[in-house]
């Protein structure tokens, strides 16, 4: 059965981790395009401020305080959205936390929390949302990472959780295909994104943590999410840098191992700035911001990502360029023959 996806301005979209970074950017963009957004996170003060801001700009927004790592809270969140808004059309599992530490120094408590949010949060959100989406039809969108396609030191536990998200999402897609369920399943795989991730993550290092550059603007991820909310999409990788890194890891694993084992220790830390006292792993972090505080240029366009979202347009443009180039070559040959004559 083909997934039934409505136009964005007719949708109610639920976004976990909606009070900062990618989730916040997506919520604002969706509201600007006419969707009703329902945001979920652990930080009620930040949620209230974000929802008030969206409403002040003419948008339709609501929030629910919940920890995605707790199945009962996610079950209640789904029930609350249905009671308040008569259902939802798209569910986005975006909530995530991080740790900057080697695996040997990461405590069991912190390692468990990473998986509780990043993996079990996706599992809980997906399975509870599907109880509604399988009846109504719609889109389930999970925000993974290029870290599900390549290894990374220091962000090791985070990387392991994203590998798990990829395996869960792709296996769930097959099960829904077998059931012929009217639900589109999408995995979004961002490269490094300029969000407060480094500010919220727990940091075992002596230096300040940051998102390894190059970093892209979260609006590129938001556009991909909203595209998937209207158009059945299998997966989207955000940013050509991620494509290059993951491709290198697949075709030349020995080389990529040596490169990544050196580069991540350089790029995931900023030795020139003092370490933050970050909160956001076991307790809600300071939210309400789309962008992080690291001082790196922000890439706001990605032709590679645009090509994935609009393959027909990209093909037509490429064919047009090729035709023009061929015509120029033919014309040049004709001029050459005339000159020789």
Image (cartoon, grey):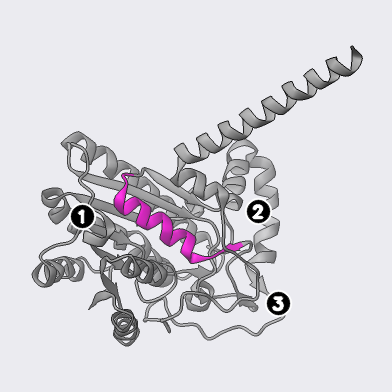
Q: Which residue is mark 3?
A: 271
* Label 2, residues with CA under 10 Å away: few <14, some 14-19, many ≥20: some
C-alpha distance separating marks 1 and 2 = 35 Å
Between residues 261 and 227, which one lies in front from this camera angle?
227
C-alpha distance separating marks 1 and 3 = 42 Å
Which residue sits at x=64%, y=79%?
206
Residue 86 picture location, percent across and down? 10, 65
In the image, residue 118 sits, relative to residue 258, either above or below, namely: below
Residue 71 picture location, percent across and down? 20, 65
Mark 1, secondary structure of its residue: helix
Q: Which mark is residue 127?
A: 1
Sequence-first tag of 1 and 2: 1
Q: Which mark is residue 260?
A: 2
Specify the segment rendered in magenta.
215-232
Between residues 32 and 131, which one lies in front from this camera angle?
32
**For residue 30, side relative to residue 251 (left or right):** left
Q: In this orientation, does residue 306 appear?
A: yes
């Amino acid at each position: 059965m083909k997934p039934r996806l409505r136009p964005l301005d007719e949708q109610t979209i639920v976004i976990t981790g909606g009070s900062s970074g990618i989730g916040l950017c997506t919520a604002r963009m969706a509201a600007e395009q006419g969707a009703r957004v329902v945001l979920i996170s652990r930080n009620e003060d930040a949620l209230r401020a974000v929802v008030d801001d969206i409403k002040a700009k003419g948008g339709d927004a609501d929030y629910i305080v919940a920890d995605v790592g707790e199945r009962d809270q996610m079950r209640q969140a789904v029930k609350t959205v249905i009671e308040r808004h008569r259902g939802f059309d798209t569910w986005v599992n975006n909530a995530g936390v991080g740790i900057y530490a080697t695996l040997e120094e990461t405590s069991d408590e912190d390692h468990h929390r990473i998986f509780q949010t990043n993996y079990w949060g996706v599992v809980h959100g997906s399975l509870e949302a599907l109880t509604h989406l399988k009846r109504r039809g719609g889109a389930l969108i999970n925000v993974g990472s290029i870290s599900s396609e390549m290894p990374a030191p220091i962000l090791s536990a985070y990387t392991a959780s994203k590998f798990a998200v990829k395996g869960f999402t792709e296996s769930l897609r097959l099960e829904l295909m077998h059931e012929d369920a009217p639900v589109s399943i999408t995995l979004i795989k961002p490269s490094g994104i300029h969000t407060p991730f480094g500010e919220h993550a727990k940091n075992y290092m002596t230096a300040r943590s940051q998102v390894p550059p190059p970093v892209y603007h979260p609006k590129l991820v938001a556009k991909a999410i909203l595209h998937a909310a209207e158009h059945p999409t299998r997966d989207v990788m955000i940013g050509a840098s991620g494509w290059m890194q993951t491709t290198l890891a697949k075709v030349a694993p020995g080389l990529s191992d040596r490169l990544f084992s050196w580069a991540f220790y350089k790029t995931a830390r900023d030795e020139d700035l003092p370490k933050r006292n970050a909160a956001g792993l076991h307790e809600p972090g300071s939210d309400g911001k789309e962008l992080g505080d690291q001082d790196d240029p922000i890439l706001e366009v990605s032709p590679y990502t645009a090509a994935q979202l609009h393959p027909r347009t990209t093909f037509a443009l490429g064919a047009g360029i090729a035709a023009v180039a061929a015509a120029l070559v033919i014309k040049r040959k004709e001029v050459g023959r005339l000159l020789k004559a």
